[in-house]
Image (cartoon, rainbow, N blue to C red):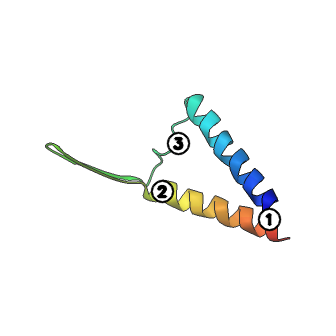
């Protein structure tokens, strides 16, 4: 459990560094954005799929 928490913390810190460096995390192709008047709907579908794949690979790697 401790190993997982350390890796999770490092992953979150890594994403934070990428965002600070200017990489547009969260604005990937496949994300849905609808703007109509004063209404904005944003659904990060592409980002969700990417995060799901990365987390699946991480969990598979940790179980070995």
Mark 2 burial class by Cα count in 10 Å: few <14, some 14-19, many 20+: some
- Distance in Å between CA atoms under marks 1 and 2: 23 Å
The image quarter in which residue 22 lies: top right
- Distance in Å between CA atoms under marks 1 and 3: 23 Å
Q: Position of residue 20 (x, y in %)?
A: 57, 30
Q: Are the residues tagged 1 and 2 within 8 Å (C-beta)?
A: no
Earlier in the chain: of badge 3 and badge 2, it is 3
Which structural element holds mark 2? helix
> What residue did someone put label 2 on?
46
Write the residue at 57% across / 57% down.
Answer: 50
The mark total stands at 3
Q: Horizontally, is 24 left or right of 13 in the view?
A: left
Which structural element holds mark 3? loop
Residue 5, numbered label = none
> What residue did someone put label 3 on?
25
- Distance in Å between CA atoms under marks 3 and 2: 11 Å
Write the residue at 62% across / 42% down.
Answer: 15
Q: Position of residue 47 (x, y in %)?
A: 50, 54
Q: Horizontally, is 3 left or right of 47 in the view?
A: right
Earlier in the chain: of badge 1 and badge 3, it is 3
Q: Quadrant of the N terminus?
A: bottom right
Q: Quadrant of the C terminus?
A: bottom right
Mark 1 burial class by Cα count in 10 Å: few <14, some 14-19, many 20+: few
> What residue did someone put label 1 on?
61
Earlier in the chain: of badge 1 and badge 2, it is 2
Above or below, 37 against 47 in this view is above
Write the residue at 71% across / 64% down.
Answer: 57
Q: Nearer the viewer, residue 58 or 9?
A: 9
Q: Position of residue 40 (x, y in %)?
A: 24, 47
């Amino acid at each position: 459990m401790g190993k997982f928490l350390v890796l999770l913390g490092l992953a979150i810190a890594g994403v934070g560094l990428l965002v600070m460096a200017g990489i547009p995390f969260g604005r990937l192709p496949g994300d849905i954005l609808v703007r109509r008047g004063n209404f904005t709907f944003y659904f990060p579908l592409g980002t969700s799929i990417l995060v799901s794949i990365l987390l699946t690979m991480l969990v598979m790697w940790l179980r070995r």
